[in-house]
């Protein structure tokens, strides 16, 4: 790992911790503020809304600022709002601070993806991006379970304090180890937004929001699936989630290597196809504990393996709006989170059982495959239109 990429990894660690630890802290926060768990669940929605709003907005507002300064500003926001969350006097204050904490999330990963690709050695752009996302996977494996334990044992406020410390540490390492880079943005925000008039942009967003939503349809209901169908004890669920986190660590590495070796959109097709098949198998074999654990690791790996290919795909497609495009994919991931959880819950509400979200997830992942194939066809059409045969010669269009 290059030293200059470590600050991006640390940023991913902090962001991943604050995003996913909330799921485990909901009962403690609900008890502390004397609210119901569904009401406390709005804290998760508030963070996701912050990501969707902040990703394009903050990148757009920083169009004339150097990447290092943008990352410093974003991580400063992240640190301050997470620190405020630790001192929240009531649920309303915490709701607002969680919304604000989510604002720099997508922008940091968007700008960080472009910075990582510029720091990468030749032919290793996707692997460099995967190093940044390694922080997110390590969070799921280590700091999220640790933060949940601290929140249960002592106070959820300490957990957000730890997140703020990670943010402060990231600020120091960005300042010390991240090199200065020129602005290097071709135009103003008006010209960058022209990218979203292209079909390719919306196909990538659909691949991200719908395709990866298949993961969230499954993982949002993994606890009842494991306890009610696979018949694990409730106290074993944290270990099962850790197994999924280990899969994410492995998958992140594989995804980065895969996207550097083949066309990123083809990597997306392969990974989403594998996810579709894995989710269908999960529907049929969840009563078998061993196979259920194997599939948990595999699906966890596939879910994170797609992160680097999608980011490098957007960066390569949005040639004059790389940072804006890369940040929007992060907003799309969070939309996928919301859509997957919503659609995955519908068959459960209809009485179809806890295996049914896996089929919903498989359908969403397969739709992602179809959108990826449409993008491939679009790219092939664009290549063929670049040359027009005239009397046996190829002249540029």
Image (spheres, grey):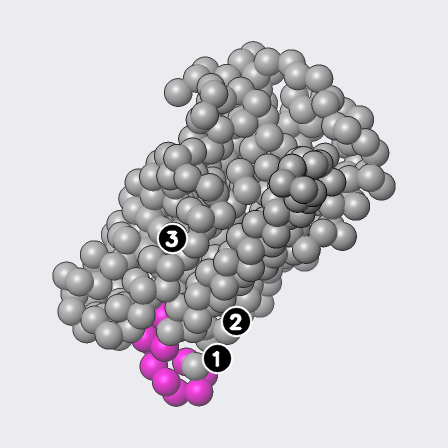
**In front: 36, or 288?**
288
The first of marks 2 and 3 along the sequence is 3
From the top left corner, tell me how far across and down residue 43 is, in percent: 58, 57
From the top left corner, tell me how far across and down residue 295 is, in percent: 25, 59
From the top left corner, tell me how far across and down residue 389 is, in percent: 66, 44
Name above or below for residue 179 compared with residue 42: above
**In front: 333, or 27?**
333
- Marks 1 and 2 close (CB-CB < 8 Å): yes
**In front: 52, or 120?**
120
**Element under disc 2:** helix
* Residue at the image position 59 percent from the left and 13 percent from the top: 179
Q: CA distance from mark 1 to mark 3?
A: 28 Å
Q: Is residue 289 magenta?
A: no
Magenta residues, start to end: 348-358
Question: Horizontally, is 246 left or right of 29 in the view?
Answer: left
From the top left corner, tell me how far across and down residue 315 is, in percent: 60, 37
Q: CA distance from mark 2 to mark 3?
A: 26 Å
* Dot label at residue 346: 1
| Residue labelled with disc 3 | 270
Question: Horizontally, is 316 left or right of 133 in the view?
Answer: right
- Discs 2/3, front: 3
Which quadrant of the rendered structure holds the C terminus? top right
Question: Horizontally, is 24 left or right of 117 in the view?
Answer: left
Counting labels gives 3
Q: CA distance from mark 1 to mark 2?
A: 7 Å
Question: Does the image show residue 334?
Answer: no
**Element under disc 1:** helix
- Discs 1/3, front: 3
| Residue labelled with disc 2 | 342
The first of marks 1 and 3 along the sequence is 3
Q: Residue furthest bottom?
A: 351
């Amino acid at each position: 790992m290059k030293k200059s990429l470590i600050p991006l990894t640390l940023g991913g660690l902090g962001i991943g911790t604050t995003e996913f630890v909330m799921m485990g802290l909901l009962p403690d926060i609900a008890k502390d503020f004397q609210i119901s768990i569904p009401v406390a669940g709005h804290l998760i929605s508030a963070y996701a809304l912050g990501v969707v709003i902040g990703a394009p907005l903050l990148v757009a507002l920083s169009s004339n600022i150097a990447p290092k300064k943008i990352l410093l500003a974003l991580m400063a926001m992240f640190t301050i709002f997470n620190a405020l969350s630790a001192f929240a006097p009531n649920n309303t204050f915490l709701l607002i601070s969680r919304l604000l904490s989510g604002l720099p999330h997508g922008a940091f990963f968007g700008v960080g993806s472009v910075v990582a690709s510029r720091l990468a050695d030749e032919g290793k752009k996707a692997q460099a991006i995967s190093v940044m996302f390694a922080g997110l996977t390590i969070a799921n494996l280590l700091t999220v379970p640790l933060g949940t334990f601290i929140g249960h044992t002592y106070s959820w406020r300490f957990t957000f304090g730890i997140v703020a410390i990670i943010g402060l540490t990231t600020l120091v390492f960005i300042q010390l180890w991240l090199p200065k880079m020129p602005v290097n943005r071709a135009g103003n925000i008006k010209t960058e937004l022209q990218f979203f008039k292209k079909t390719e942009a919306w196909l990538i967003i659909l691949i991200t929001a719908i395709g990866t939503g298949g993961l969230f349809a499954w993982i949002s209901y993994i606890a009842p699936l494991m306890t009610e169908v696979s018949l694990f004890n409730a106290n074993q669920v944290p270990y099962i989630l850790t197994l999924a986190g280990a899969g994410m660590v492995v998958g992140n590495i594989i995804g980065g290597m895969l996207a550097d070796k083949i066309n990123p959109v083809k990597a997306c097709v392969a990974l989403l196809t594998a996810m579709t098949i894995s989710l269908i198998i999960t529907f049929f074999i969840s009563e078998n504990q061993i196979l259920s654990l194997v599939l948990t690791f595999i699906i966890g790996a596939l879910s994170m393996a797609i992160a680097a290919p999608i980011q490098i795909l957007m960066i390569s497609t949005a040639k004059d709006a790389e940072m804006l495009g890369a940040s929007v994919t992060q907003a799309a991931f969070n939309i996928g989170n919301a859509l997957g959880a919503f659609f995955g819950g519908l068959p459960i509400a209809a009485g179809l059982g806890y295996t049914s979200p896996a089929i919903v997830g498989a359908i969403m992942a397969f739709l992602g495959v179809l959108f990826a194939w449409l993008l491939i066809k679009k790219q092939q059409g664009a290549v063929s239109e670049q040359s027009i045969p005239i009397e046996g010669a190829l002249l540029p269009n």
